[in-house]
Amino acid sequence: MSSLETEPEQATASRRSKITPEREQELFTAVLDTLRESGYESLTMEGVASRSRCGKSTLYRQWGSKPELVVAALHGTRRGLLGRIDTGTLADDLREAARAIGEGSGRDTPLMLALSHAALQSPELLCALRESLILPELAAIDAMVARGVERGEVAADNPATEFVATQLVGVMRARPLLECAYADETFLVRFVEGAVFPALGLDARAPGS
């Protein structure tokens, strides 16, 4: 251990070393599942402890409070799937992104809805929600669009490029409120082909367009 570490840092490292990464993921899963099912207000340390068959004192020792535990669960379960997509064309990148977002919408949408109100009251929660669920997807989609512009598939001055990520992430959250259904893979592929492609000047009918 470096001599430059402070006593609080040493204490934190010692405190958290008692839980294995596998066990930590089990606890985080219990937290997020409870959030999806019951919302933030109904989440309790006692409930998580019971669900994960863990001592309540262990949770308090590791994370100290409910907000800290939720923040840790959000950060500790990042998937970053969109960042791996690079098919060689913008149209197929966006189709794959739509499928990936749609495949996870049953998990991510309830979580975002459960945390949205609480996050507006807590800057720490809001930051964790944005960093874990929102910003990585926005950045990955923006990178796809930038590659499309570089390849000449979309004009650099096309004003729609700025809003592609917002459209995809926004419709995922909005559809349950408007139509009482998640934005699944089929819906999102139709959405990008019918709404996003025309704005970008892409032809949804052309193979590998």
Image (spheres, rainbow, N blue to C red):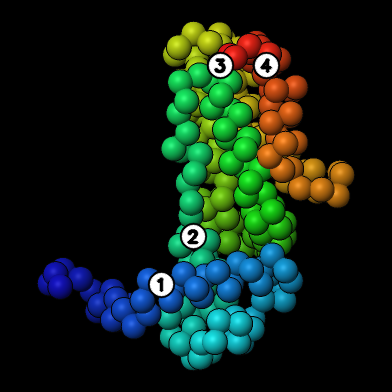
Of pointers 2 and 3, the one earlier in the residue sequence: 2
- Locate residue 137 relative to residue 191 in the image: left or right: left
Numbered disc in front, either 2 or 3: 3
- Asked whether residue 132 is in view, the answer is yes
Q: How far apart are marks 1 and 4 (CA)?
A: 43 Å
Tell me the amino acid under the disc marked 4: Ala
**How far is the residue under mark 2 from the one under mark 1?**
12 Å
Q: Which of marks 1 and 4 is nearer the N terminus?
A: 1
Alpha carbons under labels 4 and 3: distance apart: 9 Å
Crowd class of label 3 (few under 14; some 14 to 19; many from 20; radius 10 Å): few
Q: What residue is at 46 percent from the left and 87 percent from the top? A: 58
**Mark 1 touches mark 4? (CB < 8 Å):** no
Q: Where is residue 114 in the image (x, y as percent from the top left)?
A: 71, 62
> What is the quadrant of the N terminus in the image?
bottom left
Q: Mark 3 points at which residue?
A: 208
Indicate which disc residue 205 carries: none
Q: Which of marks 3 and 1 is nearer the N terminus?
A: 1
Q: In this view, does 34 lie above or below 156?
A: below
Residue 8 shows up from this direction:
no
Mark carried by residue 204? 4
Instruction: Give the class, few, some or many, for how many residues have Cα within 10 Å of label 4's Cα (few <14, many ≥20).
Output: some
Q: What residue type is labelled 3?
A: Gly
Q: SS for tag 1?
A: helix
- The mark closer to the camera, 2 or 1, is 1
Whether 138 is drawn above or below 115: the answer is above
Say which label, 2 or 1, has the lower sequence index: 1
| Quadrant position of residue 123 | bottom right
Type of residue at label 1? Glu
Q: Which residue in the protein does label 1 denote?
A: 22
Q: Residue at x 52, y 53 (%)?
A: 132
- Who is closer to the viewer here, 113 or 175? 175
Residue beneath label 2, please? 77
